[in-house]
Amino acid sequence: MSVFKIQGGRPLSGSVRVQGAKNSVLPILAATLLSEGVCVLHNCPRLTDVDHTLDILRHLGCRVAREGETVTVDASAPTGWAVPDSLMREMRSSVVFLGPILGRMGQAELTYPGGCELGPRPIDLHLMALRALGAEIEERNGRLFCKGKLTGGDITLSLASVGATENAMLAAVMAEGTTTITNAAREPEIVDLQNFLQALGAKIRGAGSSVIVIEGGKPLHGGEHTVLADRIVAATYLSAVAAAGGEGEVTGVDWRQLSTVTAVLAEAGCQVESGAQSVRIRVLGRLRSVRPIRTAPYPGFPTDAQAVVMAALCKAEGATVFAENMFDSRYRHVDELARMGADIRVEGKVAVVCGVPCLFGARVRAADLRGGAALALAGLGAEGETILSGLHHICRGYSDLAGDLRALGAEIVREEEIVTES
Ligand code: EPZ
């Protein structure tokens, strides 16, 4: 079994370039299915979620090639419209294929994505949006059977769901006529998806605001695109410096896309300097607690940064209240942090982090992607050695967490550990 071995208690010093965004490249790869030509994507991070998405594209008859950080997809002659359960189970966000498969093939079949480590992950808004464009969707034996010629329509989302917005956009570019998506998610990844679709010739505007308008129904040609930098990975690395002390820099990212996170780190006492495509952070002493942190849709505080910022505040002076408003089960890192000496109390969606003078290295296990990253960060700020397992969660969203943290001066290595029958 692979584990991370982390020697904590030493301040960091270094600089790291941020990888391409997982939550941007996944919908963009699904969108390549809409192109009748060849798509070339640069800055594609090496993630298991990306590998699974490429497997789905190959299963649907696309030709896929990767060379370093560049992925090429030829969707000129797709042959399939059904995604097998084996591929759906690898990644629940594969539901974003529903819109593009239906739009390109006129029918689609995929497994109803189950919940995940974060709790139930309903897709009622995805289905509502596609039905508003004329899709006939039947749910039978855990599978979704969809068909119909899509026509433009008005979609109003009851909440600004990222995935539902993306599915609606991808279906609407194939739907004859005008589609308006109201209460659309405003994440930077939505803007990146719009930029990619425009490169393919789609008539789409408004991404980044709550209203997106698409003039659909025309075939899309091939195109080239560079994937946006991952703002959550950037937040992770800034939080690593906050957790361990010292100084550090993340490059290749637009500071404005993580300003709610840098504002919290500055309030905690970090010195934060934002450049055009970089953020520098310096820790000048023991951090202090901050005003309550409430997760919210963009541009609010990102739920994906909750765990890593919590890890940074475990040793802060005073108590910080977190309210996790986006997912039902996103505190699974708390018990593992407690094994390291953290003092955190969870009541429903609220977690109260009472700062302790120090953390101690321990054997801990990742239960989900961002919680796993948070445990690595806590290990950097702990006295002694931390052994972190469950790395398959981390590889979903970080192409090289250990390597990137080493670039910031961390002592962290990946090792194979022989598991003895206990
Ligand atoms: C995306 O998930 C991200 N994943 C998540 O990142 C991120 O945490 C989330 O957006 C919020 O920012 C990808 O982009 C691949 P939502 P998504 O639909 O689209 C409810 C990570 O760590 N909802 O905006 O699934 C839902 O239950 C991952 O990188 C419905 O009720 O998020 C949740 O409470 C984790 N019905 C809320 O909306 C629906 O049909 C927000 O979910 C859809 C969602």
Image: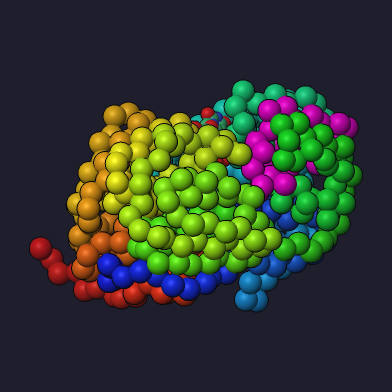
In the rendered image of this protein, does residue 339 appear above or below residue 225? Answer: above
Direction left: furthest residue: 422
x and y percentages locating residue 198 in the rendered image: 83, 50
Q: Quadrant of residue 247?
A: bottom left
Q: What stretch is highlighted in magenta?
A: 166-191
Residue 52 falls left or right of residue 401: right
The picture places residue 76, in percent across and down from the top left corner, at 80, 60
Residue found at x 42% / y 36%: 291
Which of 109/318 is in front? 318
Q: Is residue 20 visible?
A: no
Percent of width and height locating residue 161 = 60, 34
Is residue 324 a member of the stretch shown in magenta?
no
Q: Does the magenta stretch include residue 188?
A: yes
Instruction: Answer with left or right where residue 250 lies relative to residue 60.
Output: left
On screen, 163 above or below 29? above
For the N terminus, the quadrant is bottom left
Viewer-nearest residue: 355 or 68: 355
Give left or right: position of 231 versus 307: right
Q: Report the residue at 79% width, 64% height from top.
A: 224
- Residue 34, placed above or below residue 404: above
Is residue 365 something that shows in the picture?
yes
Q: Quadrant of the C terminus?
A: bottom left
Name the residue rendered at 82%, 40% in the picture: 205
Q: What's the residue at 75%, 66% (across, down)?
A: 40
